[in-house]
Image (cartoon, rainbow, N blue to C red):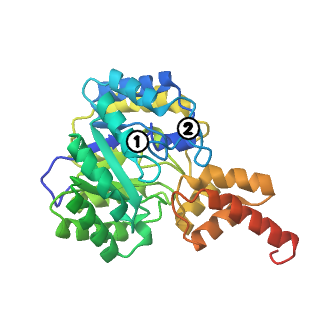
């Protein structure tokens, strides 16, 4: 496989963060310990642990965690011998207080995430993370929803604040391979730091899109064991590693141990198979934030609607992460319009 970078590829496993959405943020401490221990034994580079919506996300709006996330992060750190524990922080949800706390606990990497057009809100958190000595990465979410030029502009802001890498984050699983290629290529030509890619599998393109990103020079790659992540899940880690190995890309992670982890440790945690259902397909088709899936399904049940009606309208309104309260509003409005005969 020809790559447009000679830097080593670093994998971040996100099943204990992105997968939190799938289990409605109900991970137990023992589950986190078991998964982290197995990932560490396999040689995983980074393991991300936090509420699905990042530090401070355990709220009524986003969903209450079963166990305090700081305890889960601390448990993961206690289990990791070689893997580094990472966290996600969305400014406005997570604060400097939580950032200091996870640094003191021993988290090594923080990904500061904003909407693709709102990188300016990350400055304080990126500066602070660097001051704390943490590895610091920018995470531009819903990357499909902005022109390439805007993506580059926002990535350069994060670079100027001190980010050591910037991710193209396909939060909706809506990007097509050629769109991934042009975005990664544009960032590679415009930045002096590493480029990352985070995929969702709502259009069954996560592995293909990730390989495209690697070809174009992305060196920070996310995966989720057994596809345990929001929507239809992320790039399936053990599958990606097997394909990469076939292509001659050995990143030092034991594939057999990852397969065993997927089958015997993560598999039993899944509340349902991570397949591309009608509703997760609509996420990618309509360009809707993947973590909205369970919220939309619950709202549909409450108001007697088809979840697709809600998701399509959310996509039309270009609702973004952090606007979960809009899901109920949209569902209520659709139900009212149907009752009044405005919609059929």
Kindly indicate the quadrant of the structure image that contains residue 262: top left
- Look at the image and tell me whether residue 142 can be seen: yes
- Look at the image and tell me whether residue 238 can be seen: no
Mark 1 Cα-neighbour bin, 10 Å: few <14, some 14–19, many ≥20: many
**Residue 124 left/right relative to 90:** left
Rendered-image quadrant of the N terminus: bottom left
| Residue in the picture at 59% in, 38% down | 64
Distance between the Cα atoms at labels 1 and 2? 13 Å
Q: What's the mark number on residue 25?
A: 2
| Residue in the picture at 36% in, 34% down | 101
* Identity of the residue furthest to the front in this view: 97
In percent of width and height, residue 47 lies at: 35, 36
Q: What's the mark number on residue 301?
A: none
Residue in the foreground of this view, choosing between 104 and 50:
104
Q: Secondary structure at mark 2?
A: loop
336 relative to 257, above or below: below
Residue in the foreground of this view, choosing between 132 and 26:
132
| Residue in the picture at 52% in, 59% down | 289
Mark 2 Cα-neighbour bin, 10 Å: few <14, some 14–19, many ≥20: many
210 relative to 310, above or below: above
Kindly indicate the quadrant of the structure image that contains residue 146: bottom left
Q: Secondary structure at mark 1?
A: loop
* Identity of the residue furthest to the right in this view: 340
| Residue in the picture at 27% in, 47% down | 128
141 relative to 339, above or below: above
Whichever of callouts 1 and 2 sits on the residue coming sooner in the sequence is 1
Kindly indicate the quadrant of the structure image that contains residue 333: bottom right
**Residue 344 left/right relative to 150:** right
In percent of width and height, residue 189 lies at: 18, 69
In percent of width and height, residue 49 lies at: 41, 36
Q: Which residue is mark 1?
A: 14
Is label 1 in contact with label 2 (beta carbons under 8 Å)? no
């Amino acid at each position: 496989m020809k790559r447009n970078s000679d830097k080593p590829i670093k994998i971040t496993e996100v099943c204990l963060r992105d997968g939190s959405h799938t289990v409605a943020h109900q991970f137990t401490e023992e589950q986190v310990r078991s998964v982290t221990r197995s990932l560490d034994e396999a040689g995983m580079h980074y393991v991300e642990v936090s509420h699905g919506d990042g530090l401070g996300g355990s709220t009524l709006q986003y969903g209450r965690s079963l166990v305090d996330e700081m305890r889960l992060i601390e448990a993961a750190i206690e289990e990791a011998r070689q893997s580094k524990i990472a966290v996600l922080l969305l400014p406005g949800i997570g604060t400097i207080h939580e950032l200091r706390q996870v640094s003191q606990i021993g988290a090594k990497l923080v990904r500061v995430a904003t909407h693709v057009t709102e990188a300016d809100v990350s400055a304080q958190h990126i500066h602070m993370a660097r001051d704390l000595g943490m590895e610091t990465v920018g995470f531009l979410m819903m990357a499909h929803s902005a022109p390439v030029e805007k993506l580059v502009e926002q990535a350069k802001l994060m670079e100027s604040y001190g980010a050591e890498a910037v991710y193209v984050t396909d939060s909706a699983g809506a990007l097509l391979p050629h769109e991934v290629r042009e975005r990664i290529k544009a960032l590679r030509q415009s930045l002096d730091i590493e480029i990352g890619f985070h995929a969702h599998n709502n259009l069954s393109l996560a592995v293909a899109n990730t390989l495209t990103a690697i070809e174009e020079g992305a060196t920070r790659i996310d995966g989720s064991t057994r596809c345990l992540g929001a929507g239809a899940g992320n790039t399936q880690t053990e599958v990606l590693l097997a394909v990469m190995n076939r292509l001659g890309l050995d990143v030092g992670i034991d594939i057999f141990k990852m397969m065993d982890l997927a089958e015997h440790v993560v598999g039993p945690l899944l509340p349902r198979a991570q397949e591309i259902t009608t509703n997760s397909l609509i996420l990618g088709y309509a360009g809707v934030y993947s973590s909205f899936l369970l919220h939309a399904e619950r709202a549909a049940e409450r108001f007697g609607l088809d979840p697709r009606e809600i998701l399509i309208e959310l996509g039309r309104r270009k609702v973004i992460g952090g606007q979960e309260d809009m899901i109920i509003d949209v569902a209520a409005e659709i139900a009212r319009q149907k009752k009044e005969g405005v919609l059929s």
